[in-house]
Every structure is written in structure tokens, then in C-alpha cells.
Amino acid sequence: MGDTITTIYGDIVTETQVNGRTIRHHFHRFLDLPLMLGYQHRGRYVDIGIEAGALINVFMRSSGYILDTPESFVNLNEQSPFKSRLGVSYVAGVNVSKPVGIGSVYLALRYRHIPDNITVEQASIQQTYRQVGLNLGYILPIF
């Protein structure tokens, strides 16, 4: 909402509206081991598939800043309320692929659900995540 500063010089009264905004970001990096099952239907021009499974988190690293009080931020490299491991999360997706050369180009829409709070129990905040992503890649057969 801002604040008002009133300045008085003799008979002259000046009111100044002051507003401020600070934007800070934080990032999470995950290393996961996937356990996935899928089915792919071979079509005439493109292949269509579905996939589902679990991701076992090996570690999670956080960096950047989060809001600690309405006036201050905390550097996550100095003090982090986030866990270093998440346990198991779940993923599902659909994909479309097209044979190109010796491999295939694919486009996959994936959803990841992390069921637990990603902060430690004694943290003053609670944060959960659900991620939707669009993956583009090239499948190169090795067998």
C-alpha cells in the first residue's frame, strides 16, 4: 500500500507517497532415480504413448532467497528451511513421437506430484510442489 512522508518547510506542506517492491527468487535442483512403466502404440505416422511411475529423490539443493519477515529475506545458502532429500514422488505423462533417421523425436507432457511438504519440520513455512512440464527430446536406440 505504501507510506506517506509529510515534509513541512514554514507554510509549505509537501506530502510524498512512497511505494517499494523487491523481487527475489529461489530455485530447487533435484537428482532423482526414475522407476517408470509405459506403453507406446505404433501408428502410421506418429507413435502415441503413456507413462507412469515413481521418482526416488537422491538429493535436493536450494539456492536464492525467501521471505523471512515482511521486511527481510533469508539467503538459502546460509539458512535453508528445505529438506535435502524428498523421498518418493510420482509422475505420469503422455507423449507423441515421430521416427526421424535412426531414432525418434518425441514431445511429452508430464505431471509430477511431490506428496510431502519439502520443508523441515521446525521451519516457519510449509511448501509443497506439483510440476507440469513439456519435454522435447530425441530417442537414440542403443540396441
Image: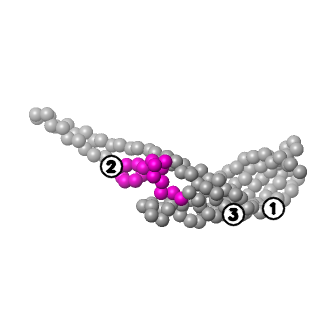
What is the number of the mark on residue 1?
2
**Pointer 3 or 1: first along the chain:** 1
List x then y, in percent, for residue 56: 66, 61
Asked whether residue 63 appears in the rendered view, the answer is yes
Magenta stretch holds residue 75? yes
Residue 39 bears which disc, if any?
1
Based on the picture, tell me whether residue 35 belongs to the magenta stretch.
Answer: no
Q: CA distance from mark 2 to mark 3?
A: 45 Å
- How many C-alpha atoms fall within 10 Å of the one at disc 1: few (<14), some, or many (≥20)? few
| Crowding at mark 3 (Cα within 10 Å: few <14, some 14-19, many 20+) | some
Tell me where residue 85 appears, x and y as whole percent. Answer: 59, 59
The amino acid beneath tag 1 is: Tyr
Q: Nearer the viewer, mark 3 or mark 1?
A: 3
Question: Is 16 left, or right, of 75 in this rendering?
Answer: left
Q: Secondary structure at mark 1?
A: strand
Relative image position of residue 8 (x, y in whole percent): 15, 37
Q: Which residue appears at 83% of the width and 54% of the height?
A: 47
| Residue 66 in sight | no
State the CA–CA distance, disc 3 to disc 1: 16 Å
**The furthest residue to the front:** 78
Disc 3 marks a residue whose amino acid type is: Ala
Q: Residue at x 67, y 56 (%)?
A: 32
Q: Magenta span covers which residues?
A: 66-83
- Compared with residue 25, is residue 93 higher up or lower down, i.e. above or below? below
The residue indicated by pointer 3 is 54
Task: Report if the CB atoms under discs 1 and 2 are less than 8 Å apart.
Answer: no
